[in-house]
Image: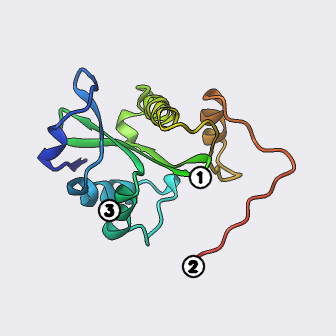
Amino acid sequence: MILLDNNLLDKCDFSSGDITYDFAKKSDTTALIHFMGKHPQAAFCEWQDKQFVNKALDFNAIIIIVSKLGRAIVGVAIAGIMGTRATINHIAVDPGHRKQRIGSQLVNRSLAEIKQRGVRRVFLFVDDDNIAAFSFWSKHGFKPTINETTMERDL
């Protein structure tokens, strides 16, 4: 488990027992990056370094950290708004804390924040061979796009 900067104890209004959900701060980026690096299924890229994450925070990215007892990271969601749409870029939950609805809470809280910011369409990417992810996202109302291909390139 990764320990958080104590500034995370500056709580938002969403916590449940010993599990706390809070918006990330720049002081959390090192622990956040380390946590995400341990979860390859979240597709967090090696170029997403501290400088990159801090810049995302400057541009109002939605980054929610889940901690246990206010110290150890057990989950992270990263989302952002691009014009009229939002994307959920990454979600990871520590394997020892899965099946506790932490991932669902991360989705719900991310979607609530996106909606509060005035955006009504959210998209995300799922690897074709990740059956568990398809099931997870389907349970949250996401559907595969029809007649649409995602295109991308690195810069």
Between the residue at mark 2 and the residue at mark 3, the CA separation in whole angstroms equals 19 Å
**Residue 105 vertical position relative to residue 84 in the rendered view, above or below:** above
Q: Which residue is mark 2?
A: 155
Tell me how the rendering is colored. rainbow
Lower sequence index among marks 1 and 2: 1
**What is the crowding at mark 1: few (fewer than 14 residues within 10 Å), some, or many (at least 20)?**
few
What SS does tag 3 mark?
Answer: helix
User: Which of the two discs, 1 and 2, sits closer to the camera?
Assistant: 1
User: In the image, what residue type sits under mark 2?
Assistant: Leu
Question: Would you place residue 7 above or below residue 112 in this image?
Answer: below
Image quadrant containing the C terminus? bottom right
Q: Between 49 and 115, which is closer to the camera in this rendering?
A: 115
When asked about the image quadrant of residue 58, the answer is bottom left
**Which residue in the structure is indicated by mark 1?**
83
Picture residue at 19% right of the left edge, 42% below the top: 8
Mark 2 is surrounded, within 10 Å at the Cα level, by few (under 14), some (14 to 19) or many (20 or more) other residues, namely few
Q: Residue at x 16, y 37 (%)?
A: 10
**Farthest-out residue, right:** 147
Q: Is residue 40 above or below residue 118?
A: below
